[in-house]
Image (spheres, grey):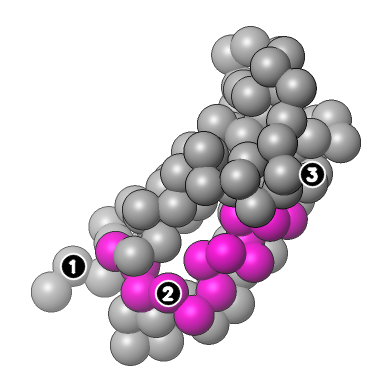
């Protein structure tokens, strides 16, 4: 779970991992339409990727897939990137080998 210092909104990402591959990803967003769009797109983008590949999904890549965002909404996409990274870090902390 991640909160935005810029606007106070909150995003939560859940991942299902099988043998290091993200087989499903869901989100809950208490935020604006851009936050919902970016978290939805970001969770779709990480499905089928390994957890390490998913760490390479940046807010810039999510914005590209969405076809752009207004400058005042960039921080919403940062929230999506941070929420994915937080979910992966949480997974890694629970599955240390
Ligand atoms: Fe808060 Fe978009 S304004 S996430």
Helix, strand or loop status at disc 1? loop
The front one of 12 and 74 is 74
Q: Which residue is mark 3?
A: 36
Reply above or below: 52 against 17: above
Horizontal relation, residue 4 to residue 88: left or right? right
Which quadrant would the N terminus be assigned to in this image? top right
* Residue sitting at x 36%, y 54%: 55
Residue 41 lies in the magenta stretch: yes
Helix, strand or loop status at disc 2? loop
- Residue 63 is labelled as none
Tell me the mark number nearer the camera, choosing from 1 and 2.
Answer: 2
Q: Which residue is mark 2?
A: 49
Q: Are dots 1 and 2 in contact, CB under 8 Å?
A: no
Q: Earlier in the sequence, mark 3 or mark 2?
A: 3
Which quadrant would the C terminus be assigned to in this image? bottom left
Location of residue 43 in the rendering, given as x and y in whole percent from the top left corner: 62, 61
Residue 8 occupies quadrant: top right
- Magenta range is 39-52
The front one of 9 and 47 is 47
Q: Earlier in the sequence, mark 1 or mark 3?
A: 3
Helix, strand or loop status at disc 3? helix
* Residue sitting at x 45%, y 52%: 57
* Residue sitting at x 53%, y 39%: 59
Reply above or below: 88 against 2: below
Q: CA distance from mark 3 to mark 2?
A: 21 Å
- Residue 96 is labelled as 1
**Mark 1 Cα-neighbour bin, 10 Å: few <14, some 14–19, many ≥20:** few
């Amino acid at each position: 779970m991640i909160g935005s210092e810029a606007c106070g909104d909150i995003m939560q990402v859940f991942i299902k991992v099988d043998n290091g591959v993200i087989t499903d990803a869901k989100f809950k967003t208490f935020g604006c339409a851009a936050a919902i769009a970016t978290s939805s797109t970001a969770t779709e983008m990480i499905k089928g990727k390994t957890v390490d590949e998913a760490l390479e999904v940046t807010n810039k890549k999510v914005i590209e897939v969405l076809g752009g965002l207004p400058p005042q909404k960039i921080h919403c996409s940062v929230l999506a990137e941070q929420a994915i990274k937080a979910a992966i870090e949480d997974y890694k902390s629970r599955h240390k080998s």
